[in-house]
Image (cartoon, rainbow, N blue to C red):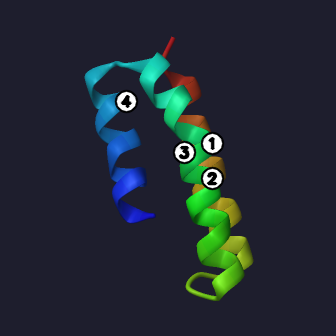
Amino acid sequence: MKSSIKEIRSLVEEGKKKEAVKKLPDTYKAIDKAAKKGVIKKKNASRKKSRLTKLVNKLD
């Protein structure tokens, strides 16, 4: 989960929006899986997904 989040953030820093958008569903899946297993709480998972989406959408 952490590695995929870091990967998306690095892609955003490099300005590669298309790659970041392609990587989002896999990252969402990892975050949801962590929340389901109890590694992180449900609202924390939701917050992480929301912030990543905002970050990627900021690139235009």
Mark before the other along the chain sequence, 3 or 4 = 4
Q: Residue furthest bottom?
A: 38
Mark 3 or mark 1, which has the lower sequence index?
A: 1
Disc 4 and disc 2: Cα gap in Å? 16 Å
Return the residue at label 3.
52
- SS type, badge 3: helix
Pinpoint residue 36: horizontal percent, then vertical percent: 71, 79
Task: Quarter of the image for the N terminus: give it.
Answer: bottom left
Residue that badge 2 annotates: 28
Residue at left offset 29%, top offset 30% = 13
Asked whether the beta carbons under mark 1 and mark 2 sit within 8 Å of each other, the answer is yes
x 65%, y 85%: residue: 37
Which of labels 4 and 2 is toward the front?
A: 2
- Residue 47 in the image: x percent, y percent? 65, 61
Q: Amino acid at mark 3?
A: Leu
Q: Is residue 19 above or below residue 8?
A: above
Callout 2 amino acid: Tyr
Gap between marks 1 and 4 measured at Cα: 15 Å
In the rendered image, which residue does mark 4 sit on? 12
Determine contact: label 3, label 1, CB under 8 Å.
Answer: no
Q: Are circles 1 and 4 on residues that touch, CB within 8 Å?
A: no
Q: Amino acid at mark 1?
A: Pro
Side (left or right) of 48 relative to 15? right
Q: Nearer the viewer, mark 2 or mark 3?
A: 2
Query: Which amino acid type corresponds to the residue marked 4 in the rendered image?
Result: Val
Q: Nearer the viewer, residue 58 or 4?
A: 4
Name which residue lies at 43% across and 24% down: 19
* Disc 1 target residue: 25
How far across and how far down the image is residue 38, in percent?
Answer: 64, 88
37 shown above or below 46:
below
Q: Disc 1 vs disc 4: which is toward the camera? A: 1
